[in-house]
Amino acid sequence: MPSIRLLSPRLANQIAAGEVVERPASVVKELVENALDAGACRVDIEVEQGGVKLIRVRDDGSGIDENDLPLALSRHATSKIASLDDLEAVASLGFRGEALASISSVSRLALTSRTVSQEAASRVEVEGREMDARVSPAAHPVGTTVEVRDLFFNTPARRKFLRTEKTEFNHVEECVRRQALSRFDAGFTLRHNQRVVQSLRPAESALDRERRIGALCGQQFIDNTVVIDAEATGLRLWGWVALPTFSRSQSDLQYFFVNGRVIRDRLVAHAVRQAYRDVLYNNRHPAFVLYLEVDPATVDVNVHPTKHEVRFRDGRLVHDFIFRTLHKALADVRPDDHFRGAVAQSFGREANTPAGVPAGTASQPWQGPAPASDQSGPSAYAAPGTPSQPRQDWRASDQMAFYQSLNSGGGLAGDAQPSSPAPTGPLPTPPADSGDEPPLGYAIAQLHGIYILAQGRAGMIVVDMHAAHERITYERMKRALAEQDLKSQPLLVPLSLAVSQKEAGLTESHGEELQKLGLQIERIGPETLAVRQVPALLRGADTEQLVRDVLADLIEHGQSDRVEAVTHELLGTMACHGSVRANRQLTIPEMNSLLRDMEATERSGQCNHGRPTWTLVTLSELDKLFLRGR
């Protein structure tokens, strides 16, 4: 076996570069983070040939003293931490002291800098061959410019793994986008091959912040978001979460920042996914830009060389806080919140509320009567009649009869059923434009026994009555179940399960939590469990698979919502079977009552399966169809 010897500085840096410098975007990330840590208010990034030929990052930060320039390119040299206490409460983006040394080992690097106290700037140059730093005078304003040329020129094997120029630049652009989203107080400019791609001024006001979000994530995103800002137990979560109707086929519009650092974390992803669980269709993904502020001492950022992963001291507290905040924000979404995006897409920005106004305030929200405390039936709202026609009130007894008729007989939506007689007599006319018009307007007709057509100020609203009633029924069932708690049912013959010792130990340490889920599990051997009780609602489910899934969740996340998920799935099925069916003719008051219930129901924009329950066809869109005004 060869004798042990110390690696040369060049080889050690190149090994470190294998972890830190994956592609040009990695270089841009490290250099921009250094600029922001130096207090820069302006960061200019210029790249050529996707960053392979040239990467130049200039900032107006505090700069580097002339005597520190050679040391700045040395490995494990940093001004950001000095002790273990500093490492355990890192507040800066960088702290390892490896980036510049690693970059200079695989490129031709030149760093020019000047501090406020210096009369002239200094320049240090180094190439990846001998790593000898050469310092010389230079002209430069206060701040720093780093030039990286010919990336991987001395490691051709690494260079072969690079993709096309367009692909590499896309990664660079995504990196700059993340940094621009993380720091609204700094301006950013990105140029590629002498062409300006992004030019962002500092965004201090709420209006400027939303403009930056719109420029980086698309105006359609900002038009379909809900603004959140919540604090609890030393945590603060704020930002923008997209409405469920703005879901995407992939998770390409998800940005999460912890103390200004962009991260990808399984715990965070699970909390977000759980919050969106019953409002997303199939395998769609939510979109969000969220910022979590925590005490730096409660989060460990020294987990991975790229610093994209973190570890929370109390992961469960963070998970629950994120889930509760997003869950409440989505539950509070009402039709008014959906109108902003629909109207903006139809009329353009000039006809909509300016960016910066939170979703739901684009129009004056409807202030109607408070819903009754008894939620067993629909709200007693009916469309007002014309001045010459008395208002058609709908008594509580009529409401109950209506819902009983909906929940009895007939088939599911889409099934052919004998239709009830159509309503006779004059139909109530929606009132003229008034400030108290409800968000979903007033019903004017029913289409094919499936859709409700309503008239509102913005245009025509089309409602899938089965999907809407399904969500209303589902939410009432969930609320009733939450008030009664989960009831357990003993098994006549306890189910014996063979598990690992770790899983068996979890049943003892999480016994109370399992009991709250309606599960009574006893450890009867080192690797054997006995399931004695299960939730009464799930007595027909696959008990063994349910228990194994719960244990798997406890291992990965420290908690499990599996029982709740399965229970809600069952309630969703029951709600689907108990909702109004196709070809059921409703009267105008009945349709209006359904609309009012939708406005008062959580998550009423989607059915239990994530499909939309209503859509808006604006007057502008109708005018285009009929070429009006041309």
Image (cartoon, rainbow, N blue to C red):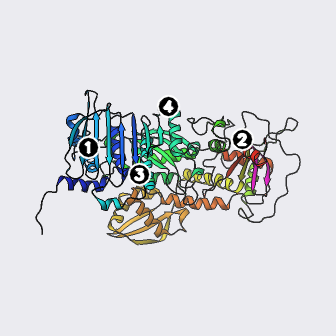
Name the residue tied to disc 2: 458
Q: Residue at x 48, y 68 (%)?
A: 543
Closest to the observer: 120 or 500? 120
Cα–Cα gap, marks 1 and 4? 33 Å
Amino acid type, callout 4: Ser
Q: Which residues are magenta?
A: 429-456
Residue 338: where, in percent of width, then height? 63, 45
Disc nearest the viewer among 3 and 4: 3
Q: Percent position (x, y) of residue 141?
A: 32, 31
Q: CA distance from mark 3 to mark 1?
A: 34 Å
* Marker disc for residue 309: none
Residue 552 pos. (x, y %)? 41, 63
Q: Give how far apart the Cα atoms at labels 3 and 4 are.
A: 33 Å
Labels in figure, total: 4
- Name the residue beneath numbered marker 4: 205
In space, the residues marked 2 and 3 are separated at their CA atoms by: 46 Å
The residue drawn where x is 29% and y is 56% is 18
